[in-house]
Every structure is written in C-alpha cells, then in structure tokens.
Image (cartoon, helix red, strand yellow):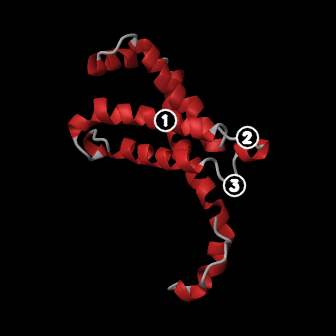
Amino acid sequence: MTTGKIDRKRLIFPSLAGLYETFSPASYSFMRFATDAVLIPHGIQKIMLGSAPNLATVIDKQMGVSYPLIWAYFAMFAESVGGICLAVGLLTRLAALIIWIEMGIIIVYFQWQFGYFWTVRGYEYALLWWLLCLAIFFRGGGRYAVDRLIGKEF
C-alpha cells in the first residue's frame, strides 16, 4: 500500500498533487465497483426477460455440454449476484473468480471465432472483464469493501 503522498517533483502538473492524494485511496474500490456495475445489467436483463431457456439453447449449440439450462442459470447468477457482490466487495475473491470463469468461457466458446473487436462480436469486452476480475481476485476487495467491514475475506 502506498502512503497516499504524491511526489510533486515527478508530476507534469504539480498543482494536481492534492487532487491525486485525495482520490487515490478510493481509486481501486471505484475500479472494482465500476467493473461490475457495468456487468450487473446483463444479468438483471436475463432475469427480467426470463431468457434462461433461450440462453440454454445457445449454450447447447456452442458448447455441447450436458444440462445447458443449468449453465444458463449459472451465467445469470454470475452476472447478477456475482456482479453485485463484486461491486460492493462482498465475497470479493469468490465473486471475481466466478465472473473470471464465466468470461473465460464466453471468450473461448462464444466470441473467439469473431476475432478481437467487440464491434463485430469479438472477445475484446469479455477479455477486459476477464483481466479486471483476475486482478481483483489477487488484490481482494480493497479499502472500501464489505469484506473489510466484516473483517473476513474469502
């Protein structure tokens, strides 16, 4: 952890040091929150539209796994409940791991064939989530997390 003190001599705009010192302690928690505040609507939309059977059909076609409906519910759970937990920092590492696994599956089975760019259904966006969740998994909830408030971390 850093002390929060910024070396003004290293800054191009030294007058911004106070701003950096003020907001840097919350920057990691903000990044963790933003990562999944963007993902949560995907899960909520799937729940509200009751799209598990449709998603199960796509999962069965792309992956050919047994019990595709269970996998569809897993995706809905990861994006909604896992996303909420990660956003507030509750069971942070477990939530990050669950979403990391889901994003890995999405990248390999659903988007790899389309290439990198998300504008043509590529894996760019899922890769960003995958990388962020990997970093969050290793770092944990951070300063402003429910895990820290309760004094326990997975």
Could you tell which of marks 1 and 3 lies nearer the N-terminus? 1
Q: Residue at x 53, y 84 (%)?
A: 11
Q: Which residue is mark 3?
A: 143
Taking the image as shown, residue 57 lies to the left or right of residue 16, namely: left
Q: Which residue is mark 2?
A: 152
Taking the image as shown, residue 113 lies to the left or right of residue 21, namely: left
Q: Which residue is mark 1?
A: 99
Q: Residue at x 40, y 48 (%)?
A: 128
Neighbour tally class for label 3: few under 14, some 14-19, many 20 plus, Cα within 10 Å: some
Q: Amino acid at mark 3?
A: Arg
* Closer to viewer: mark 2 or mark 1: 2
Q: Quadrant of the N terminus?
A: bottom right
Residue 75, numbered circle: none
Q: Position of residue 51 (x, y in %)?
A: 45, 19
Q: Amino acid at mark 1?
A: Ile
The CA distance from mark 3 to mark 2 is: 13 Å
